[in-house]
Amino acid sequence: ETGVTQTPRHLVMGMTNKKSLKCEQHLGHNAMYWYKQSAKKPLELMFVYSLEERVENNSVPSRFSPECPNSSHLFLHLHTLQPEDSALYLCASSQDKLAGSTDTQYFGPGTRLTVL
Amino acid sequence: AQKVTQAQTEISVVEKEDVTLDCVYETRDTTYYLFWYKQPPSGELVFLIRRNSFDEQNEISGRYSWNFQKSTSSFNFTITASQVVDSAVYFCALSEARSGGSNYKLTFGKGTLLTVNP
């Protein structure tokens, strides 16, 4: 496997279900991200992990719960979602460098989530 | 605050035509980075290019070229001799350089859907 992989690619769930999205990066990076892409909206950054610590949480509802057990894996745990949470969820990774720089983020193929 | 505007929501061209995708950005920082990503129907965002604010040289990569103009805050993307495989949504993005604290924020434009017809 190369790059950033995400599973599952498609997920349909009811509002009372609990599910998890998985992301794995094979690039040796130390930062990982979750984004939400809804129709007709710009990509929204949800969470950022650097060196396995959460460094950003953009006012995301608590029904979304991220987990980063190591620098290669990132999960997004979902519970009691709403239909408006239906979207493409994208994972990305980058190599965290020194201050004064910025890092190119490399994206996975996404998980298309439908909440019924 | 950062902002990226891609005024063209959709563009449709015929194969072999040249096409330019516009990107205009706003930032208060003097050091920043600009990106273009391609999102084919499969969904993955594919990284195309990254430029820093101190490098205004235009870049060419095969049929792709980028025109960075600080004077007009624009970072336009041209595809020469377009092909059907170029059909995708293209996103322009902006990131400010981190200074001390962490700044991982990529601000994306809304994207331009390019359709190349045979």
Image (cartoon, rainbow, N blue to C red):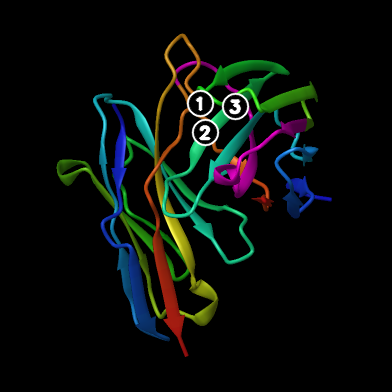
Most extreme residue toward the bottom, as rendered? Answer: B118
Question: Of all residues shown, which one is farthest toward the top?
Answer: B100
Residues in magenta, as a range: A74-100
The foreground one among B55 and A72 is A72
Is residue A55 visible in the rendered image? The answer is yes
Chain hosting mark 1: B
Q: Residues within 10 Å of mark 1 (few under 14, many from 20)?
A: many
According to the image, label 1 marks what residue? Answer: B104
Q: Residue B42: x, y in percent?
A: 64, 64
Q: Identify residue for label 3.
A: A47
Q: Is residue A97 magenta?
A: yes
Q: Report the chain holding disc 2.
A: A
The answer to whether residue A70 shows anywhere in this view is no
Evaluate if marks 2 and 1 touch, with contact meaning CB atoms under 8 Å apart: yes
CB under 8 Å between discs 1 and 3? no
At x 48% / y 54%, what residue is drawn?
A39
Disc 3: host chain:
A
Mark 2 or 1: the one toward you: 2
Judged left or right of residue B76, residue A78 is right
Label 2 to label 1: alpha-carbon separation:
9 Å
Residue A55: x %, y % from top left: 59, 16
Front one among A23 and B93:
A23
> For the point 65% across and 17% down, which residue is it?
A54
Return the x and y of residue B113 as percentages of the image width and height.
Answer: 41, 66
